[in-house]
Image (cartoon, coloured by chain):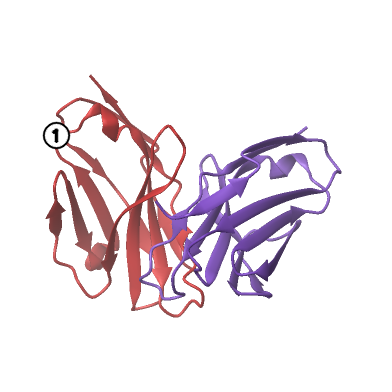
Chain colours: A red, B purple
Amino acid sequence: AQKVTQAQTEISVVEKEDVTLDCVYETRDTTYYLFWYKQPPSGELVFLIRRNSFDEQNEISGRYSWNFQKSTSSFNFTITASQVVDSAVYFCALSEARAAGNKLTFGGGTRVLVKP
Amino acid sequence: DAGITQSPRHKVTETGTPVTLRCHQTENHRYMYWYRQDPGHGLRLIHYSYGVKDTDKGEVSDGYSVSRSKTEDFLLTLESATSSQTSVYFCAISESGQYNSPLHFGNGTRLTVT
């Protein structure tokens, strides 16, 4: 069965530091997508990025970047030069091609606290 | 923002009472989902729907039922609420059932069962 593990429960940094969030997943499917969501203190869930299993090219989008390594089943997410507004809970999620209905499996989340 | 409205936003109820949560969408998306969020567990799928009157169970469906009589509405019912169902419930929608399609979430309903 699919599984997503976010070993870090909470990370605290000072503003302008970089923050890297770890995500490790398990799946028997060879075709899948990985996602990152953000949940700010206001409680809503916001889709950030997605990556398919065939594209291991790392990318940068503004202050966000992600490192996808199929060999280690990891999909890490980095916030560069963190800001107070980045304080939130971040969730990693997996969607398998063979699973009908696009059902996402989420990790337990990592709470990021950015102090001024 | 995706047009998803959950109601009520907060509810306190007693053990053994029935509770219905509503999710309403204005996007005309075919797929709708109910998740619950609990500390340490992230979000877990309760039920989902792939069309009017078409629903299926998720990972934690025991004690819950759903109904979808219209494209825009997806109801989650706790037939007899228990304290273990105290949680934050999120509704989500997806334009397609394809695995590459991100889910878009409502603002959640905080349910407390006393």
Task: Tell me which residue sits at (42%, 32%) in the image.
Answer: A41
Marks counted in the figure total 1
Work out whether residue B109 or residue A107 is closer to the camera in this orientation and state it: B109
The location of residue B30, given as percent across then percent down, is 53, 72
Q: Within 10 angstroms of label 1, few (less than 14), some, or many (20 or more) residues?
A: some
Residue that appears at 44% across and 57% down: B104
Q: Amino acid at mark 1?
A: Ala
x then y, percent, for residue B22: 66, 52
In the displayed image of the protein, which residue is found farthest to the front? B26
Q: Is residue A116 above or below residue B3?
A: above
Q: Is residue A27 in sight in this rendering?
A: no
Query: Which residue does the image show at 41% across and 68% down from the upper left?
Result: A95
Which of the 4 image quarters holds residue A42?
A: top left
The image quadrant that residue A12 belongs to is: top left
- Whether residue B62 sits left or right of residue B101 in the image: it is right
Residue A95 appears in view:
yes
Relative depth, front residue between A95 and B94: B94
Which residue is more in the foreground, B26 or B13?
Answer: B26
Q: Residue A51 vs residue B76: left or right? A: left
Is residue B38 placed above or below A61 in the rendered structure?
Answer: above
Image quadrant holding the C terminus of chain B, namely: top right
Res. B52 image quadrant: bottom right
> Of all residues shown, which one is farthest toward the right?
B16
- Pointer 1 chain: A
Please name the residue shown 79% across and 45% down the image: B81
Query: Where is residue A64 shown, x and y percent of the image?
Result: 18, 47
In this view, B28 is above or below A112: below
The residue that disc 1 covers is A81
**Helix, strand or loop status at disc 1:** loop
